[in-house]
Amino acid sequence: MYPDFIGIGAQKAGTTWLHRNLQVHPQIHMPRKEVHYFDRKMNDGSNAVSRLFGKTRNDDQWRRQVKQIPLQLIKNPSLQELRWNLRYYMRPYDDRWYSQVFEPKKAKVSGEITPAYSVLKKEKVAHVHDLMPNTKLIFFMRNPIERVWSQTVMSFDKVEKGSAASASESGLLRKIERDSSYKLSNYMRTLENWGSYYPEDQIFVGFLEDVSFFPEELLGRLYDFLGVDPHFDQRLTGKKIHTRSEATMPTSVAVHLARNYHAEISRLAERFGGYASFWLYCAERLIEDPPGEKTITYPLFESYLWDGWDGARQARSGPLHSVRVAG
C-alpha cells in the first residue's frame, strides 16, 4: 500500500499548485498534502494521549487537524472516511501506519507531497528506498534567490505576524540566516542524496517557471511520467496558489542572496541549462551591476533580468519555448 510517487520539494517551488492539480486527476489518489512521516513522525514514538497534551510541533499539528474532523465528516459523511481518520490520527507512527495512509487508493496511482523530504539525510532516503524501491519522485526547483525570499515573506506572515515589506534590511538578513534557508535551497544535495538510491528515470525534475509559462505542457509530461492519462484537462492549471502581496524584493537582499547562492546556482546551470542558466544570469548581474532602485520586481522572471537574458539567449539558440520547457 505504499505510495506510487512522492513529491519531495522544494519548499516554495510550486508544490501546493502541484498537489492541487494532481489530486483532481481521476486516476490519482492523494489522501493529504505533507504527511511528514520520514522527516518528523518516523521516530516520534507518541500515541494519541501524549499528542493531546504534548508540546512538540507534531503535537500542535495533530491537535489542529483533529479539531477539523467533525466539520469534515458533516460535509462529507462517510464510514470509510471515519475509519481512515481513526487510523491516521490514533495509531502510533510506524511504517505500517504510513502504508495505511494510502490504503483507500484502490486501483488508482497514489502519492503524497512533503517538501521537507528534500533535506532528508542519506540514511533516511535509504529507508524510503527499502520500503518502496519502485516509487517515483517529483522534485520542483525554483531560483534559490526567489525561493529564499518567498520563504522569508511566508515566515513573517505566519510567525512574526508582520510584513517583510516593513522590516529593516538587517532584520530581513537575520531572518534569512536564522531560518537555515541554505539547506532547503541546496538542490544538488537533494538530487545527490536521492539519486544515490533512485535512478534518473524515476525522478521528475520540474521548474517553477513552467508553472507560470506552460502549466498544461508541464502537467501533461508529469501525468505521463506517473502513468496516468496525460490528456486529462481541468481548470486549475493557470491558477496561482498562495500568492503574496509583495511584487518586489529589496535589491540589497537580492544581491546578498545572489552572492550566497552563486556557487550553487553555477552548479545547477552547468547540469540543467535552460531556466537554471537564467538563475545564473540573475545572480551575476545582481552581483556585478545591481540596479540603482531600492527594490527589484519579483519574481525575477518578470523583471528586466529576463529580457536581458532572453535576448542574449535567443541570439545564440533560437526559439524560447524549447528552453522554457527544458528539464
Image: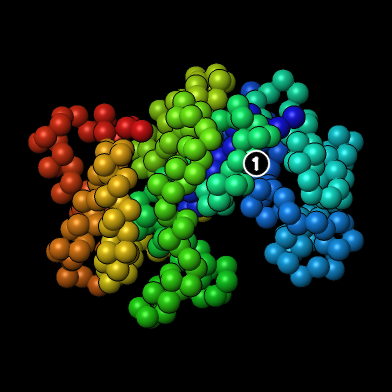
Q: Give the residue at mark 1.
A: 127
Q: Is residue 256 left or right of residue 243?
A: left
Tell me which residue sits at (90%, 61%) in the image. 49
Tell me which residue sits at (20%, 64%) in the image. 287
Q: Nearer the viewer, residue 313 or 25?
A: 313
The x and y percentages for residue 283 are 24, 57
Q: Is residue 280 left or right of residue 74?
A: left
Dividing the picture into quadrants, the one containing residue 160 is bottom right
The x and y percentages for residue 55 are 76, 70
The x and y percentages for residue 195 are 48, 37
Tell me which residue sits at (65%, 41%) in the image. 127
Does dot 1 land on a helix, a strand or a loop?
helix
The amino acid on which the numbered mark 1 sits, given as a three-letter code, is His
Dividing the picture into quadrants, the one containing residue 256 is bottom left
How many marks overall? 1
Residue 305 visible from this viewpoint: yes
Query: Is 130 placed above or below 307 here?
Result: above
Tell me the quadrant of the picture where the N terminus can be found. top right
